Structure formats: structure tokens, C-alpha cells
Amino acid sequence: MPTLFDPIRLGSITAPNRILMAPMTRARGTRGHVPTPMMADYYAQRASAGLIISEAIGITPQGLGWPYATGLWSAEQIAGWRRVTGAVHAAGGRIVAQLWHMGRVVHPSFLGGAQPVSSSVTTAPGHAHTYAGTRPTRRRAPCAAMRSPAS
Ligand SMILES: Cc1cc2nc3c(=O)[nH]c(=O)nc-3n(C[C@H](O)[C@H](O)[C@H](O)COP(=O)(O)O)c2cc1C
């Protein structure tokens, strides 16, 4: 029977062991959602994992509502993540990106007051994280296609 320390094939990745690092949002990016040098150190220190799954990374400003989390929509963010993946590879590790769209959990304060983009027309349960602390989630307006002609 294989042990945690035996290699495993995960799609196109061959991991030297079966210890996978779970995605963990650390909120160590800039206010512009750019990865910082500290993040390259953090991930490179964990390169002995069979595979690192990155913290969740926003794919668009409309879908990122977590203070100091990072994104992948701008050239600066991509360059920042390249520094992270480069450091992990240089340390002999493997890393994949977890992509994130937070939908209706994005608070309007991230969007200049605009409603979040979501597939749901109901208010999310719980609260949203903002730069001013936790705030109630906001109901989003149904998109035009979902409104009945009478309303
Ligand atoms: C600080 C912290 C940040 C996390 N961020 C993410 C994340 O970005 N994406 C995700 O899918 N899960 C995230 N999680 C959930 C973890 O990946 C993991 O599923 C969870 O901690 C349960 O694992 P456990 O049963 O070993 O504690 C986070 C957990 C913690 C503690």
C-alpha cells in the first residue's frame, strides 16, 4: 500500500509525495491585489509538499471582495504571481492556482458602490469582509433578463 511519502500522478503533474497544501487565503497582497515578496518566501518555504494549491485568487475585480487578497486580471498581478511560482519552482516545488469569483459575497464597497455580479438574486447569508471590517451582505439587483415584463 502506498504511503504519504510515495509519488502520485495528478493529471499532468507528478508529485513526489501525497502531501498537498490546502488553499489558504492569507491576505498578504497589496490594496491593488498584487502579490507581495513575502508571499514568494511563504510559498517557497512549503515547496517540499507534493503539490501546493494556492490561496484563492480573484479572476476579476467584480468577483473579489476580500481585503488584501490577490488577483490575476492585471499584468502587475500576473508578474507578482510569476515571482511566487518562480520561487516555488526554484525550490523544487509544484504549485497550481485556485481561481476565485466570490459572486454576491463581494461587498459593494469593493465595487465603488455597485452591486456584485452573481448568478443568484438572493442575499448571501452571513457577512462580507471589507476594508472597514465585516458588513452585512447586500442584496443584488436581478439582471434585466430575470425581471418579469410587468415589474
Ligand atoms: C486561514 C485559512 C484560509 C483559507 N482559505 C481558503 C481558500 O482560499 N480557498 C479554499 O478553498 N479554502 C480555504 N480555506 C479552507 C482550507 O483550505 C481547508 O479546506 C479547511 O481549513 C479545512 O481543512 P481541515 O479540515 O484540515 O481544517 C482556508 C482555511 C483557513 C484556515
Image (spheres, grey):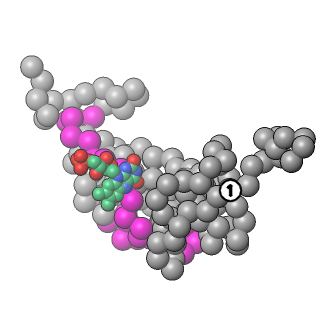
- Which residue is at a point 21% across and 29% down the rendered structure image? 7
Q: Is residue 145 left or right of residue 113?
A: right
Q: Is residue 112 above or below residue 64?
A: below
Query: Per the image, is 24 magenta?
Result: yes
Residue nearest the viewer, comparing 132 with 126: 126
132 and 150: which is toward the camera: 150
One can see residue 74 in this view: no
**What amino acid does circle 1 point to?**
Arg
Q: Residue furthest bottom?
A: 132
145 shown above or below 58: above
- What x and y, as percent, mark residue 131? 51, 77
Image quadrant where one finds the N terminus: top left
Is residue 81 visible in the rendered image? The answer is yes
Question: Does residue 72 show up magenta in the picture?
Answer: no
Badge 1 is on which residue? 140
Q: Is residue 122 left or right of residue 42?
A: right
> Which residue is located at x 54 percent, y 53 percent?
124
Q: Which residue is located at x 39 percent, y 59 percent?
A: 25
Q: What's the magenta region?
A: 15-41
Question: Could you say where residue 34 lies in the image, as x and y percent from the top left?
Answer: 53, 67
Cβ of disc 1 within 8 Å of ligand 1? Answer: no
Report whether 39 appears left or right of 142: left
Is 116 on the left-hand or right-hand side of 95? right
